[in-house]
Image (cartoon, grey):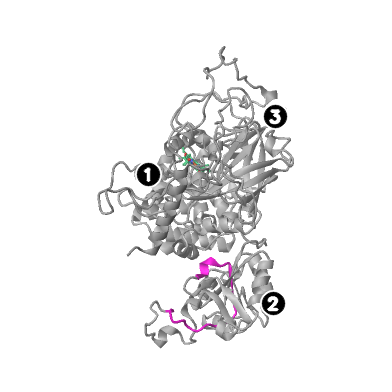
Amino acid sequence: KKNPVAATADKVAETVRNAMGTGNEIPGSPGPQAPSVEEPTEPRGPLPPKPDQRGPDTYSPTGQKTGAPQDKVAQAGEYLTTAQGARLYDTDHSLKAGPRGPVLLQDHHLREKITHFDHERIPERVVHARGAAAHGVFQGYGTAEGISKAAFLGKDVETPVFVRFSTVLGSRGSADTVRDTRGFATKFYTSEGVFDLVGNNIPVFFIQDAIKFPDVIHAGKPHPDREIPQAQSAHDTFWDFVTLHTEATHHTMWNMSDRGIPRSYRMMEGFGVHTFRLVNAEGATTLVKFHWKPKLGVHSLVWEEAQITAGMDPDFHRRDLADAIEAGAYPQWELGVQTFPDTDDQMFQGIDLLDPTKIVPEELAPVQPVGLLTLNANPSNFFAETEQVAFHVGHLVPGIDVTNDPLLQGRLFSYLDTQITRLGGPNFGQLPINRTHAPVNDMLRDGMHQTAVHRGVAPYRPNSLDGGCPFLAGADTGAYIEVPADVPAGRKVRDAAASFDDHFTQPRLFWLSMTPTEREHIVSAYTFELNKCYEQAIKERALLVLANIDADLCAQVAAGLGLPAPEPTAALTDPQPSPALSQLGDSWPLDGRIIGIVTAPDQGLDGVREVRQAVLDAGMVPLVIAPTGGEVGTGDETVTAQRTFATARSTEFDAILVAGAPAPGADAYGARDAKVDDAVAGAAGIDPRVLLMLTEAYRHGKALGAWAGGAAALEAAGIAGGAPGVVTADSAGTVLEQVRELLARHRAWNRFIPAV
Ligand code: HDD
């Protein structure tokens, strides 16, 4: 007997066969193809999307038109087709010699489908493989017009952008919340060509010269024999490298600080790292460092939370970015510059501007805002956009130029080189996500995956066959002209300036600028990572490095490693601390913060619906947690649960509100029918997952609030009502009000360190 689903499918197939057999025009099918558009050989407008790949306009769920080019939507039209456009009547059965017979080689659809699938993966990025991205817009303030002629920095000029955030060490499928540097790469599709600002969330780099990049990455990546550990710096080869190359000390210190475990991509600073050279319309130059300042403030996870999240939700940062944009909580950053005179020595107050392991404290050179970045649309297709986007530090526009920083100079070579392998040839600039929005009129021809149909016979210049065009532009017609900066004379050497030798002053500056809470986190991070190393000699060498930063830091880490603290090998300097480096001590907006609401529906839902609405009204995200999913509660008093005690974990929430003290659910101990020992069930008879949630949130410094039966749950978790960051009151409204104030300061650090 035929199964009914298969019978229906057969019927559909038969209808399609009949329709095709008649040769009739099928309603809704695409009309005749428009002639293909060739790339011009004479100056003219930008290349429009190819009509044969054009899809419908796409919108984000909030109704925002996505900024992505329009020719990226493959699924257009009513009927499934082969890659050649032939309509298909069946894609689930291969062509066989009879239903039980062997498959026929002539089945082109089968071979095309499998062959394409076999080649779906491309090599992942050799670094920054794991990432997430979004479209947005950059609006210039016009404040930089005096120092740069770049059109996109002009007042109220709006430029589409695509931003990709990433971790550095992990592979494509690795967890988001690992301790690592984060990439912050921005592609500006300006009217003068693409400008890429390929930065990180840490303002300094591990090495001073690009020639060491393969070495530092080989050391940070998993060990070559077993390929472990994944996406971690807590292993011997990493610490071997950074203790042998003391220029890495400053970046390592940032990695061990809270900056290594951001709460969200939306809450990270970004830095261009190198010093760039800006040039204005008169040709005057200024040296600058680029900064991105997040409107939501800079916030971090705590280490245990980051580790738990890596297992519970490895996509935590990716999800956070996409959810926020989808909800209309568009993340924003202000772009700013620190400016320095373009002097012959390229030093600023004793700091070498060409050394990428050095910052210039903001107190010495304030960050001056030049524009606003808003991310307002999620990509429609991860592969086409996030995976295939290709950034390059050499993508510059008139008004922005590079300096002699030896790290930057090497980067200028690496990006295009690696992308030729990753994206399969030299034509990836034609991919929609990489395509400039400015007119293109180049003489680059042929190569793998060439999609332009170039006209003309003379792709060389000058010529006398294609009208001699194109012309060359000059400064007054928008040419990109390198600043004719003097090259310092000297001998050809493999060497660096003497000023590159100071490896400890700035790590010490960073340490001295931290609050007690942040210092404690740094000590714990060093202790954790070094305790994961097997080699005693590496731990001892790491302590020697720390001794040259600060005796207190060294002594605390040494105690955690069970080793003696060594003496410094050089006299410590006394830099002026930079309060701007600390993340703590201020209040920030709460947009998009996640509030968990624990309920015990059988005890009533007093205030739950109201508080949920109030959280929403405040621009935050309420997630109701109940024993089961679906509609919980009785009678008029019901609410929809988004999480159950089995699916919720404290790490998802920025603060937890407790409306009841739920008894253990039948599924509380793993197996529904398991006999539960009274001692395990907990004296208070409260669901152990709720107790875990509360104790974890408490340990992670999160705000907690309770009303009605909720106070009993806090008490059962051993959390005192009046403890710092813990609010109990009669009304849900009062509790939420106080929790909001606590949350604006991110965490209740005074729970642990009263000085803060
Ligand atoms: Fe790099 C990717 C940032 C030094 C070589 N880098 C890459 C990405 C970011 C950075 C954010 C990911 C871009 C994306 O999302 O597609 N890199 C930096 C920063 C550096 C830095 C801020 C120092 C200040 N990088 C650096 C050096 C070299 C490279 C010194 C080589 C000499 N980086 C690469 C690369 C990557 C890359 C191998 C891998 C994938 C890609 O370029 O397209 O070329």
Q: Is residue 636 magenta?
A: no
Residue at 69%, 77% (x, y): give it: 734
Residue at 65%, 45% (x, y): give it: 137
Numbered badge on residue 160: none
Residue at 68%, 81% (x, y): give it: 731
Looking at the rendered structure, the secondary structure element under dot 2 is helix
Which is more N-terminal, label 2 or label 1? Answer: 1
- Left or right of 494? Residue 297 is right
Work out whether residue 252 or residue 620 is closer to the camera in this orientation and state it. Answer: 620
Q: Is residue 503 visible?
A: no
Name the residue tied to disc 1.
Answer: 109
- The percent coordinates of residue 371 (x first, y second) are 69, 44
Numbered badge on residue 284: 3
Numbered badge on residue 734: 2
Magenta segment boundaries in residue numbering: 648-668
- Three-letter amino acid code at disc 1? His
Q: Of discs 2 and 3, which sits in the foreground?
A: 2
* Majority secondary structure in the magenta region: loop
Would you place residue 437 above or below residue 124 in this image? above
In the rendered image, which quarter contains the C terminus?
Answer: bottom right
- The percent coordinates of residue 518 (x first, y second) are 56, 61
Looking at the rendered structure, the secondary structure element under dot 3 is loop
Residue at 62%, 19% (x, y): give it: 471
